[in-house]
Image: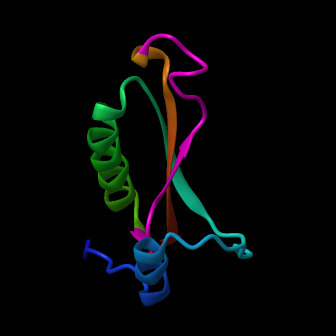
């Protein structure tokens, strides 16, 4: 898998802190739900990327992390739930 460079408009927004609204088209994603500290998210991301490659899919864009709760909602990092998604297509 090749690393993906962020689009120019995303880099510009990261630099300016601008807020905007956009429509995101429907897409097929491979996803994994990680339970535990955010320090384990990177390993979960690697697991998901391996699964994509081993199951005949190819990565079609950058991933998304959805934080379903936070330390305001739960008292223990072990209870954090993070969903990772990568857009894919079957090879």
Q: Judge left or right: residue 31 versus residue 15.
A: right
Instruction: Say which quarter of the image contains residue 70.
Output: top right
Residue 54 placement: quadrant: bottom left
Return the x and y of residue 88 as percentages of the image width and height. Answer: 50, 68
Q: Residue at x 39, y 58 (%)?
A: 52
In the rendered image, residue 46 lying in the magenta stretch gets the answer no
Q: Nearer the viewer, residue 56 or 11?
A: 11
In the image: residue 77, left or right of residue 81: left
Instruction: Indicate the quadrant where residue 62 lies.
Output: bottom left
Magenta stretch: helix, strand or loop mostly: loop
Q: Is residue 59 magenta?
A: yes
Bounds of the magenta segment:
58-76
Residue at 43%, 72% (x, y): give it. 14
**Location of residue 78 in the rendering, given as x and y in whole percent from the top left corner:** 41, 15
**In which quadrant will I find the N terminus?**
bottom left
Residue 84: give x, y in percent of width and height.
48, 47
Which residue sits at x=26%, y=40%? 43
Q: Nearer the viewer, residue 43 or 58?
A: 43
Instruction: Give left or right: position of 23 versus 82.
Output: right
Q: Residue at x 50, y 10 (%)?
A: 75
Residue 45 locus on image (x, y percent): 34, 48
Q: Residue furthest front?
A: 16
Quarter of the image where the C terminus is located = bottom left
Q: Residue furthest bottom?
A: 8
Vertical relation: 57 (above or below) 75 = below
């Amino acid at each position: 898998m090749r690393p993906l460079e962020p689009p120019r408009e995303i880099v510009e927004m990261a630099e300016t802190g601008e807020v905007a609204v956009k429509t995101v088209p429907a897409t097929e994603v491979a996803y994994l739900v990680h339970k535990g500290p955010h320090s384990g998210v990177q390993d979960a991301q690697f697991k998901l990327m391996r699964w994509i490659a081993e199951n005949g899919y190819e990565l079609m864009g950058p991933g998304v992390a959805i934080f379903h709760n936070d330390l305001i909602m739960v008292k223990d990092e072990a209870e954090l739930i993070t969903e990772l998604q990568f857009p894919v297509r079957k090879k």
